Image: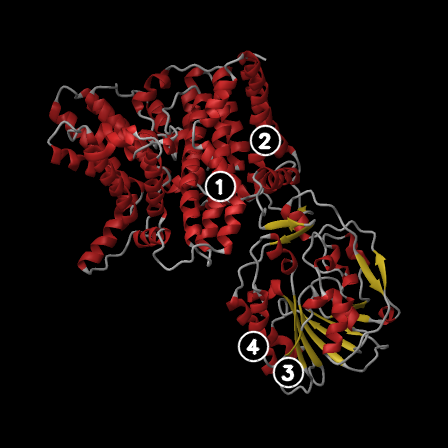
C-alpha cells in the first residue's frame, strides 16, 4: 500500500467508525437496564429552556450517551482488558484478580467508620437489649480481601485492628471469632459473598459460641445457574461463570420465612431469584429489612435476633436448626429507632453479624 | 464540551463534518461559526455572551483601527479601547476575586467576593482578539471585513477552549482560501486520534494516580516523588494531547494551526524548556509584551525587569492565585540565572542539564498544582524529607507497581524516540509498506480503546479548562 492509498484507507476507516457508531447509536432503541452492571441505564433527558441554560441537560446527555452507546459491554470489556493486559494495571475500577478470584480494593481501615458501627450497636444495646434478658454476641465476617490482598501485594485493611477496635467499643457483646473457619475458596470468585455450601463450619462455630449446637447433614444442590457475581459486571473482564449451590436438609423444608415488607410467608430459598439479575438473592429473597424464620422442628426453643448484612442471608437458614425463631434485621433499610414497632427483644439472644465491607463503610447503618 | 467525550466524538463531530463538507465554499465559515458557538454553549450557555461581545468589539475596533491607521491618536485610541474591553472582561471574570481577596487581607476590609465562574477558554480567545487588534494597528494584517470570518477565527471550536493560541496572521489567508483533501483529512484524523490517546490513555490514567495521592492517608517521600513525576507527565500529555486534537481537527477543516509542544522534557535548560512548552503562549508574550518593552536590547537591569514582567504575567495568566504567580516567578529567576551565568555550560554538558531541568520542572508543577501556595511548598518540602514522612509506604509501592507501565509509556512518549523509530523504519521500502498497513489498523484500534474508556465513564477531567 502506498502513501496515497494509506491516506484514503485512514480517512475511510475513521469516517466509517465515527459515522457508523454515531448512526447506530441514534437508531438503536434505548436500553432499560445493564444486566452485567446490575443497574438502570440513563434515559434521554428532557429538553427544556431551563435545563439547557443551567447545563443540566448537557451533563445528563453525557451520561445518557455513554450508557446507551452501541456495544457498550464490549467497549467496557476492551477498556478493562487494556487496563490489565496493556497497561498491566493491578486493578481496574478498583477490582483486581488473584488466583482466578476477583475482589474490590477495600482500604485503608476507616476507624471512624468502625466507631460509627460500634455506636450504632451500642444504641441498639442500650435501647433494646440491656434489660431484655438475652445474651449479646458479636462476630465479624472477613471480606475476600482478607485472604487475597496482602498476599497478592495489594493494599489491605488492618483486619486485626478493625476487630480489636470493634470489640473494644462494643464491649457489651461477646465476640465469636469465625475467621479461622474461612478461606478464599469459601467465597464466590466473581462476587463479594461467601458460598453457603462452604460456611457450615462458620455456622457451627457461631452456634457453639452462642451455646447451641448444629449437627444437621446437608446436601448441596446445584442451582444450574451460570452465576456471574457483582464483580463480573463492575470489572467488565472476561471472567467465567460459576455454579451456585444451596444446601438442603430435612429441617430446612419445615422452616417458614415471614417477610414484613411483602407481608408474605415462604421458604428459605426463592428459586425464582435464580433467573434475576442477582442470583444470590435466592437466599431469603435478597436484601430485606425485616424477616422472621420460624422452625417448629428446631433443636431448642431459643430465639435469636440477628443484626446482619447480605452475608447473613445464606448463614441464617443454617442457624435456624437450633433456634425456633430467628429475626433478621437489616438496619441499612430499617432505622434502628423504629425497631420498637416491630420486634420483641424479650428473652432472645442477639447476634451482630457484619462483614468488614459494611463495617468499614458504616454510614449506611441507620 | 470536551473532545474526549462521547457527545463530541459521536454526535457533534460527525454532524459538523457532515454539514461542513456538504456546504458550498462560501458557507463553510458560517457552518464552522454556528457549530463553534454550539460547542461553546454546550458547556457554558450563559457565557456565550462574553465571547460574542469580545468578537463584536474586536470586529468593530479592527475596522476603525484600519480606517484611521494614518491618524495615530485615533488608531491608538481604538486599539486601546479594544484592548481595555478584552482585558477588562478577562480581569473581571478571572481576577476580580483575587484582587478583592488580597485587598481585603491588606486593609482588613471585607468587600464581598463576586464569585464569578470563569468562562471556559476566555484566557485563550482574549489573547487571540488582542493579537488581532494589535496586528491590525501595526499594519501586519488587514482588518477582517466579514464578521462571520472573524467570528469563525475567534470561536473556532478546535482551538477555542485550550489553544493553541492561533494568531489571526497565522490563518488570515486560510479563512478566505483553504484547500481540503483526503490527505489533510487523513493527517488530521491521525493527529486527532494520537492526541485523544495521549489524553485518555496516559493523562487520565495518571490523573487517577494524582487523585489517589491527594486522598491518601499513607503518604511517604517516595509517594510524593511519584506524584510529582506523574503530575509532570500528566500535565504534558493532557495539554499536548489537547493541542494535538486541536491541530488535527484544524487540518480536517483545512487549517494549519501552529505547533504548541516540541518534546519539552528533552530540554537541557529552563530556557530551552520554554521554547518547547506551550510555544504559542511563549511567542505571544514575546511578541506582544517582551519585545514592545525593549526585549534584551536595553540595559541589563531593564532587561531583567522585562523578563520578570513577562513571567509574572505568564504565571498570572495560568491562574488567579499566588501559587501561579510564584510558579511564573520561579521560571523568571531560573531563566535570568541561566542567561546571566550558566546557560552555556548547560548547553555543552550531556546528562546533568537534563536532570537539573527535570527536577525544576517537577518542582514547578508541584507549586502549579498546589491547592494554595502554602500547600505546594509543603509538598515540595515533603519531597526532600521535610515534614517527617516515612521514606516509603505500602500505598506508594502499590501505586508504583500499578502505574509503572503508564509512567514508562509516558516517559517514552515524552521523547522523540517513537517518532525517530517510525522515521527509521520508513526509510526502507519494506518498512514503509508495513507502516502504511499498520497505521490505519493502529489508529482504529486506538480509537476503539479510547471509546471503551469513555463509555466506561472513567476519570476524564480536563486541566486547561480552568484557564
Residues marked 4 and 2 touching at CB (< 8 Å)? no
- Which residue is at a point 62% across and 49% down the rendered structure image? A96
Observer-side mark, 3 or 1, equals 1
Observer-side mark, 2 or 3, equals 3
The reply to the same-chain question for discs 2 and 3 is yes
Observer-side mark, 4 or 3, equals 4
- Total number of numbered discs in the rendering: 4
Figure quadrant of residue B36? top left
Q: Earlier in the sequence, mark 4 or mark 2?
A: 2
Residues marked 4 and 3 touching at CB (< 8 Å)? no
Between the residue at mark 2 and the residue at mark 3, the CA separation in whole angstroms equals 61 Å
Between the residue at mark 1 and the residue at mark 2, the CA separation in whole angstroms equals 24 Å
Indicate the position of residue A120 as horizontal and vertical percent values: 57, 74
Q: Residue A129 carries which label?
A: 3
Q: What residue does disc 1 label?
A: B204
- Which residue is at a point 45% across and 29% down the rendered structure image? B245
Asked whether, in this view, residue A158 is left or right of residue B148, the answer is right
Amino acid at each position: 500500500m502506498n502513501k496515497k492509498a494509506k491516506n484514503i484507507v485512514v480517512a475511510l476507516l475513521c469516517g466509517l467508525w465515527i459515522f457508523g457508531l454515531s448512526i447506530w447509536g441514534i437508531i438503536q432503541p434505548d436500553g432499560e437496564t445493564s444486566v452485567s452492571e446490575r443497574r438502570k441505564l440513563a434515559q434521554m433527558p428532557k429538553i427544556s429552556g431551563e435545563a439547557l441554560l443551567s447545563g443540566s441537560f448537557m451533563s445528563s446527555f453525557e451520561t445518557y450517551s455513554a450508557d446507551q452507546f452501541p456495544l457498550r459491554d464490549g467497549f467496557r470489556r476492551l477498556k478493562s482488558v487494556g487496563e490489565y493486559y496493556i497497561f498491566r494495571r493491578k486493578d481496574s475500577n478498583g477490582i483486581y484478580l488473584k488466583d482466578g478470584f476477583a475482589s474490590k480494593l477495600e482500604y485503608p481501615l476507616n476507624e471512624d467508620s468502625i466507631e460509627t458501627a460500634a455506636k450504632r450497636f451500642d444504641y441498639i444495646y442500650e435501647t433494646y437489649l440491656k434489660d431484655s434478658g438475652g445474651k449479646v454476641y458479636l462476630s465479624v465476617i472477613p471480606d475476600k480481601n482478607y485472604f487475597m490482598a496482602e498476599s497478592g501485594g495489594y493494599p489491605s485493611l488492618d483486619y486485626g485492628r478493625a476487630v480489636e477496635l470493634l470489640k473494644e467499643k462494643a464491649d457489651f457483646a461477646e465476640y465469636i471469632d469465625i475467621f479461622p473457619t474461612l478461606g478464599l475458596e469459601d467465597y464466590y470468585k466473581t462476587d463479594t459473598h461467601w458460598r453457603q455450601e462452604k460456611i457450615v463450619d462458620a455456622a457451627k462455630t457461631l452456634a457453639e459460641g452462642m451455646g447451641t449446637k448444629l449437627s444437621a447433614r446437608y446436601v448441596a444442590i446445584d442451582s444450574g445457574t451460570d452465576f456471574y457475581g457483582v464483580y463480573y459486571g463492575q470489572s467488565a473482564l472476561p471472567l467465567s461463570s460459576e455454579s451456585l449451590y444451596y444446601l438442603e436438609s430435612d429441617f430446612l423444608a419445615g422452616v417458614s420465612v415471614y417477610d414484613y415488607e411483602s407481608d408474605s410467608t415462604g421458604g428459605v430459598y426463592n428459586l425464582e431469584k435464580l433467573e434475576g439479575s442477582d442470583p444470590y438473592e435466592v437466599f431469603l429473597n435478597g436484601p430485606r429489612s425485616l424477616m422472621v424464620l420460624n422452625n417448629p422442628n428446631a433443636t431448642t426453643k431459643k430465639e435469636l435476633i440477628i443484626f446482619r448484612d447480605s452475608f447473613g442471608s445464606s448463614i441464617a437458614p443454617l442457624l435456624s436448626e437450633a433456634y425456633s425463631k430467628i429475626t433478621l434485621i437489616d438496619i441499612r433499610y430499617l432505622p434502628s429507632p423504629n425497631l420498637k414497632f416491630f420486634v420483641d427483644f424479650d428473652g432472645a439472644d442477639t447476634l451482630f453479624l457484619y462483614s468488614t465491607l459494611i463495617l468499614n463503610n458504616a454510614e449506611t447503618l441507620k | 464540551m470536551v473532545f474526549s467525550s462521547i457527545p463530541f466524538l459521536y454526535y457533534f463531530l460527525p454532524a459538523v463534518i457532515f454539514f461542513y463538507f456538504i456546504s458550498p465554499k462560501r458557507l463553510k465559515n458560517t457552518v464552522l461559526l454556528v457549530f463553534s458557538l454550539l460547542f461553546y454553549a454546550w458547556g457554558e450557555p450563559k457565557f456565550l455572551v462574553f465571547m460574542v461581545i469580545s468578537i463584536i468589539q474586536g470586529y468593530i475596533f479592527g475596522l476603525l483601527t484600519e480606517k484611521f491607521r494614518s491618524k495615530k491618536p485615533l488608531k491608538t485610541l481604538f486599539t486601546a479601547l479594544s484592548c481595555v474591553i478584552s482585558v477588562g472582561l478577562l480581569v473581571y471574570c478571572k481576577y476580580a476575586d483575587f484582587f478583592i481577596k488580597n485587598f481585603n487581607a491588606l486593609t482588613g476590609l471585607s468587600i464581598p467576593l463576586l464569585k464569578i465562574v470563569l468562562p471556559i477558554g476566555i484566557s485563550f480567545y482574549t489573547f487571540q482578539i488582542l493579537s488581532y487588534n494589535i496586528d491590525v494597528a501595526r499594519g501586519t494584517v488587514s482588518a477582517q471585513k466579514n464578521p462571520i470570518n472573524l467570528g469563525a477565527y475567534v470561536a473556532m471550536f478546535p482551538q477555542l477552549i485550550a489553544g493553541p493560541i492561533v494568531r489571526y496572521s497565522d490563518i488570515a489567508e486560510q479563512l478566505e482560501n483553504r484547500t481540503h483533501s483526503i490527505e489533510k483529512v487523513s493527517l488530521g484524523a491521525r493527529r486527532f486520534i494520537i492526541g485523544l490517546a495521549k489524553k485518555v490513555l496516559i493523562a487520565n490514567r495518571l490523573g487517577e494516580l494524582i487523585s489517589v495521592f491527594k486522598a491518601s492517608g499513607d503518604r511517604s517521600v517516595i509517594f510524593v516523588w511519584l506524584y510529582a513525576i506523574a503530575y509532570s507527565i500528566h500535565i504534558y500529555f493532557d495539554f499536548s494531547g489537547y493541542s494535538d486534537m486541536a491541530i488535527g481537527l484544524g487540518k480536517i477543516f483545512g487549517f494549519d494551526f501552529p505547533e504548541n509542544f516540541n518534546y519539552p522534557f528533552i530540554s537541557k535548560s529552563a530556557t530551552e524548556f520554554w521554547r518547547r512548552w506551550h510555544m504559542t503562549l511563549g511567542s505571544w508574550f514575546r511578541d506582544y509584551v517582551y519585545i514592545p518593552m525593549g526585549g534584551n536590547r536595553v540595559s541589563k537591569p531593564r532587561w531583567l525587569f522585562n523578563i520578570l514582567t513577562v513571567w509574572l504575567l505568564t504565571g498570572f495568566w495560568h491562574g488567579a492565585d499566588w501559587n501561579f504567580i510564584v510558579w511564573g516567578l520561579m521560571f523568571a529567576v531560573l531563566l535570568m540565572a541561566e542567561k546571566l551565568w550558566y546557560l552555556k555550560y548547560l548547553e555543552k554538558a550531556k546528562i546533568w542539564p537534563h536532570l537539573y531541568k527535570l527536577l525544576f520542572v517537577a518542582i514547578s508543577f508541584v507549586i502549579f498544582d498546589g491547592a494554595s501556595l502554602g500547600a505546594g511548598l509543603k509538598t515540595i518540602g515533603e519531597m526532600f524529607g521535610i515534614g517527617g514522612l516515612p521514606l516509603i509506604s505500602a500505598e506508594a509501592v502499590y501505586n508504583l507497581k500499578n502505574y509503572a507501565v503508564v509512567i514508562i509509556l509516558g516517559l517514552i512518549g515524552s521523547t522523540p524516540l517513537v517518532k525517530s523509530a517510525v522515521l527509521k523504519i520508513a526509510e526502507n521500502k519494506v518498512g514503509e509498506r508495513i507502516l502504511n498497513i499498520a497505521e490505519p489498523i493502529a489508529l482504529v484500534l486506538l480509537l476503539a480503546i479510547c471509546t471503551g474508556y469513555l463509555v466506561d465513564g472513567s476519570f476524564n477531567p480536563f486541566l486547561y479548562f480552568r484557564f
